[in-house]
Image: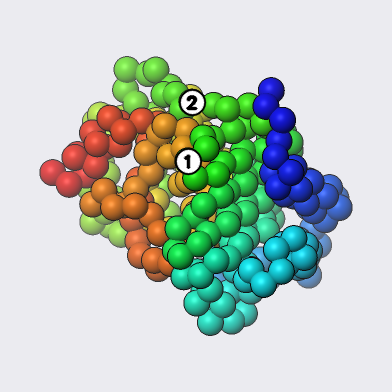
Amino acid sequence: MTELSALDAEIRDLMRFAARNSMLPRFRTLAKNEIEMKGEDDPVTIVDREVEAFLTEALSKLAPGVAVVGEEAVAEDETVLKHLSDQCWIVDPLDGTANFTRGEEPFGIIIALADAGKAVAGWIYDPISDRFCHTKAGEGAFVNGERIASRTTGQERPVAGISRLFLTEEQRAMVDAKLAPYYSMVEIPRCAAEQYPRLALGQNDVSSFKRTLAWDHAAGVLWLNEAGGKAARLDGSEYRVDEHGKPGLVGASNPELWDEFVARVLL
């Protein structure tokens, strides 16, 4: 196993501390008054807020002067998004909140470091398994300190993780006509901290995302690409964190699967 760099070890320890002191003690024990709704099917919990506050303070000490763009901070003040064009930390304090509120897995913590609109490092933590995915641009992708290469499921019909939750009726019809005949269709876990590892670790072959919020995708896109998979916009352009509201993103275990999937979508 490769020894973690000082920064990777620091980030892992912060994520692990937040999970063990705020997240895991409340898993399946949340009180009703500890859950609110930011919008339709968009819950926020006391854990989201506690973990974001902790990580924001810790990351600000780790790199003074570097802005922190947290999901809950943006929910309170959208002007925080302006920092996505600069050097900044991007934090999802509890990815998979909807799962967490139901007492279900998966859920996780995601942190990315971006500069000039591009992710340059990313960290994805699964508190249940203690799995720590990490990457830096140009340096490969790692799980718990061990470098990994993205692999497919090996299935004759590639496994496609597709959520219908945010699709229009027209888009659902497209999925049924253009994709379902050629793929083994599975539901996504509603947790980017789990979906990106599935694409590189032989569980899913391809997945599409309609919403592409920076805190959900910045770290995972970089990690998957560094592993030898491919994550990009439908037109093949790179994912940028400062295109926060732009819809549409496809991730795949390798570039060939990505090309095949996108060609079917665009037929």
- Sequence-wise, the earlier of marks 2 and 1 is 1
Q: Is residue 87 left or right of residue 35?
A: left
Residue at point 61%, 62% (across, down):
89
The residue closer to the viewer here, 117 or 162, is: 117
Which element is circle 1 on? loop
Q: Is residue 64 above or below residue 181?
A: below
Q: Is residue 122 left or right of residue 27?
A: left
The quarter of the picture where residue 75 lies is bottom right
User: Quarter holding the N terminus?
Assistant: top right
Measured as percent of width and height from the top left, residue 72 is found at: 64, 70
Measured as percent of width and height from the top left, residue 53 is found at: 76, 68
The residue closer to the viewer here, 128 or 56, is: 56
Which element is circle 2 on? loop
Q: What is the three-letter code of the residue carrying label 1?
A: Gly
Residue at point 23%, 56% (across, down):
170
Q: Is residue 198 left or right of residue 235?
A: right
* Residue beneath disc 2: 149
Mark 2 to mark 1 CA distance (whole Å)? 14 Å
